[in-house]
């Protein structure tokens, strides 16, 4: 069998008849992300409306964030450092604190602990106890004697913290200390302690941050690699099991009964020939025996090849099964879309779909049966197979092998031998009959002429059924072998291109910085005049989301909204963002006074989702979906909801944003005055 056409064949498991599946696949769990409903009162605006996106969630297995309380302090610290780099500062603070309490208290540990304390929040967000702990570490940094690459960064952070909390030193000394640090350490401090900087230091540092963001925004092949993070982990290929032929006991009994006249004829001929010592009859019977065995064997094999070929061809002509699950519905859509997209040149989409209708139908049903008992398999995880089938069909069409025969032709020598053996056996049988032409022999011979065809058909069905199944299984094995090769190629490519969470964070950080800089330019505001800035990111439109084990969600499409707190009031600036491409859509702008904001609250919604509701005194509300609900979980457990909210609250920065917005809503203009001082 040629490998070029092997993937077309194979038969699904379950009920099987003539090589085709009988009945639709069993029900399987539908895939899909949990739906989120944004509700706004009359006169309100919805900052983001996310629809229900079926099969839009990707989970990536990773041990990056895995740690437990029994791990040594070194591992606790490393887990905290990684979480700090991965948008989880409160989680980072927890693990680094555990490492310190366990006795690991080096300059490096204290340095990253201070960064985690201030990341995504300001001095006002610290409790009295936290302020005391921060000042203790900052004071000890003044007298740090231990050498190493983190000693000087620790002293710089300590100086910055003492300047912010106690007014010690001046902005110039802070800028000088920062300027001599290695680029990596300076970038960390400027990013995580952004809300602590002020005045001249703040303006100086901002220029560095923007310049760095422009360099990092498309670094490491973002446009060519970011898509891979959201691509489903490919499911290992399977082919549906080909059923074992049903027990043919009834068929064998019929064949035996139909064979009795021929058997009695043969017995009477043998007895007569031996009893009469008739050499002609004896020789004729020997020829009948050898010729009959050889001829029938070759005839059965020849016919079985034609039967197998007919079964393979007929599968593509079976009536279409009505899909019964979301998995099968989406499977059909994916096959149609991929065969349209990857069709041969010079043929219309409609013509190609008509040409490949039977092929697509069989392959869809085969995949449905293969994965019917595994609800964890999503349409996205098997999409690579429909693409492969579509591309391979187009390739074979171009090569002229699209209609390649699925079963090898019968050997010409064997065919000639079959015809010759049966012909010689038939002549010899007539010679034997007429040599021993007694009444009983002739009677049973005549009867056998009518019963032998039924006997042959019965014996052939039993012979051919297993041969056809063997051919289908071999064909399925060939297809699986080709899929395994493609699976290894595709998995390797995805793994090599998929960015790490740290790279994703670097790109998002750059996007956020560019967005804030665009807002500053739009409103002609200096960075030193911004008392606080809030950036709220939320999923947008037909988004896909992905996360590694224990990590926060990432979204292909987001709404990024920045609020600048200035002397003139609140300046709002928002854009839709295509994270995979690193591009922004048309911006929306709004301004309002501190006295205009009535309330800011984070509301829970079913499925563990959270929405931010900003209400103005006019009654107008803006609803932003901060944390989407859990996918495929109508009634998530309390632990699932807690983990979803905890991780994504930390990563979204909503805690700091809510603190600022609620402060403005409560204190009005006084908030700006108090924060300025």
Image (cartoon, rainbow, N blue to C red):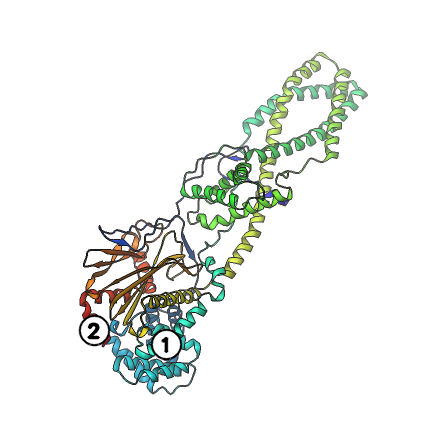
Left or right relative to 394: residue 330: left
Q: Where does label 1 land, which residue?
A: 205
Q: Residues within 10 Å of mark 1 (few under 14, many from 20)?
A: many
Left or right relative to 559: residue 220: right
Give the camera-side residue of 228 and 340.
340
Q: Residue at x 59, y 29 (%)?
A: 461
Q: Secondary structure at mark 1?
A: helix
Q: Secondary structure at mark 2?
A: helix
Q: Is residue 341 above or below residue 540?
A: above
Residue 500, percent from left and from top: 45, 64
Give the camera-side residue of 393 and 363.
393
Q: Quadrant of the C terminus?
A: bottom left
Q: Quadrant of the N terminus?
A: top right
Q: Is residue 193 above or below residue 427?
A: below
- Residue 79 image label: none
Residue 464, percent from left and from top: 61, 32
Q: Where does label 2 land, which residue?
A: 673
| Distance from Cα at disc 2 to Cα at disc 1 | 24 Å
Q: Residues within 10 Å of mark 2 (few under 14, many from 20)?
A: few
């Amino acid at each position: 069998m040629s490998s070029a056409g092997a993937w077309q064949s194979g038969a699904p498991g379950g009920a099987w008849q003539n090589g085709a599946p009988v009945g639709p696949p069993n029900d399987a769990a539908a895939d899909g992300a949990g739906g989120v409903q944004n509700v706004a009162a009359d006169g309100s605006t919805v900052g983001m409306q996310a629809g229900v996106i079926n099969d839009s969630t990707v989970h990536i297995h990773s041990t990056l964030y895995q740690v437990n309380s029994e791990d040594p302090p070194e591992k606790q610290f490393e887990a905290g450092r990684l979480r700090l780099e991965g948008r989880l500062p409160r989680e980072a603070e927890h693990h680094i604190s555990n490492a310190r309490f366990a006795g690991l208290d080096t300059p490096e540990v204290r340095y990253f602990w201070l960064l985690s304390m201030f990341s995504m929040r300001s001095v006002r967000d610290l409790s009295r106890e936290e302020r005391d702990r921060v000042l203790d570490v900052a004071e000890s940094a003044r007298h740090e004697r231990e050498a190493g690459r983190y000693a000087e960064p620790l002293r710089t952070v300590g100086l910055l913290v003492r300047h912010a909390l106690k007014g010690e030193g001046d902005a110039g000394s802070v800028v000088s200390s920062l300027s001599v640090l290695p680029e990596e350490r300076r970038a960390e401090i400027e990013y995580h302690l952004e809300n602590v900087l002020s005045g001249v230091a703040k303006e100086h540092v901002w220029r560095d941050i923007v310049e760095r963001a422009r360099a990092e925004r498309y670094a490491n092949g973002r446009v060519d690699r970011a898509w891979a993070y959201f691509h489903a982990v490919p499911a290992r290929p399977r082919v549906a099991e080909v059923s074992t032929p049903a027990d043919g006991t009834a068929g064998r009994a019929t064949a035996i009964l139909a064979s009795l006249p021929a058997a009695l004829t043969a017995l009477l001929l043998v007895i007569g020939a031996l009893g009469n010592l008739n050499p002609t009859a004896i020789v004729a019977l020997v020829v009948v025996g050898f010729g009959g065995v050889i001829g029938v064997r070759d005839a059965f094999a020849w016919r079985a090849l034609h039967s197998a070929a007919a079964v393979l061809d007929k599968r593509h002509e079976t009536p279409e099964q009505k899909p019964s699950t979301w998995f099968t519905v989406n499977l059909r859509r994916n096959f149609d879309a991929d065969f349209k997209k990857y069709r041969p040149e010079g043929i219309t989409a409609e013509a190609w779909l008509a040409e490949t209708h039977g092929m697509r139908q069989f392959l869809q049903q085969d995949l449905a049966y293969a994965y019917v008992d595994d609800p964890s398999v999503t349409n996205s995880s098997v999409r690579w197979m429909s693409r492969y089938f579509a591309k391979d069909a187009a390739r074979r069409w171009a090569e002229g092998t699209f209609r390649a025969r699925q079963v090898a032709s019968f050997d010409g020598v064997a065919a000639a031998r079959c015809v010759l053996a049966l012909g010689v056996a038939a002549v010899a049988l007539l010679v034997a009959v007429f040599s021993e032409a007694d009444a009983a022999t002739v009677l049973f011979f005549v009867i056998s002429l009518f019963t032998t065809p039924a006997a042959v058909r019965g014996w052939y069905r039993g012979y051919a059924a297993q041969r056809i199944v063997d051919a289908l299984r071999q064909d399925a094995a060939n297809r699986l072998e080709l899929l395994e090769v493609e699976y290894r190629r595709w998995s390797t490519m995805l793994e090599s291109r998929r960015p790490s969470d740290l790279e994703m964070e670097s790109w998002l950080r750059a996007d956020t910085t560019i967005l804030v800089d665009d807002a500053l330019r739009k409103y002609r505001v200096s960075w030193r005049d911004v008392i606080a800035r809030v950036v709220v990111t939320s999923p947008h439109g037909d988004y896909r989301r992905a996360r590694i084990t224990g990590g926060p969600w990432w979204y292909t499409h987001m709404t990024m909204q920045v609020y600048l707190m200035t002397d003139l009031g609140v300046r709002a600036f928002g854009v839709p963002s295509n994270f995979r491409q690193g591009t922004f859509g048309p911006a929306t702008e709004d301004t309002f006074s501190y006295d205009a904001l009535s309330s800011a609250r984070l509301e829970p919604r079913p499925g563990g989702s959270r929405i931010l509701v900003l209400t103005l005194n006019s009654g107008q509300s803006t609803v932003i979906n901060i944390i989407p609900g859990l996918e495929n979980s109508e009634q998530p457990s309390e632990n699932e909801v807690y983990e979803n909210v905890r991780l994504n609250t930390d990563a979204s920065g909503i805690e700091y944003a809510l603190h600022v917005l609620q402060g403005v809503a409560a204190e009005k203009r006084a908030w700006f005055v108090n924060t300025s001082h």
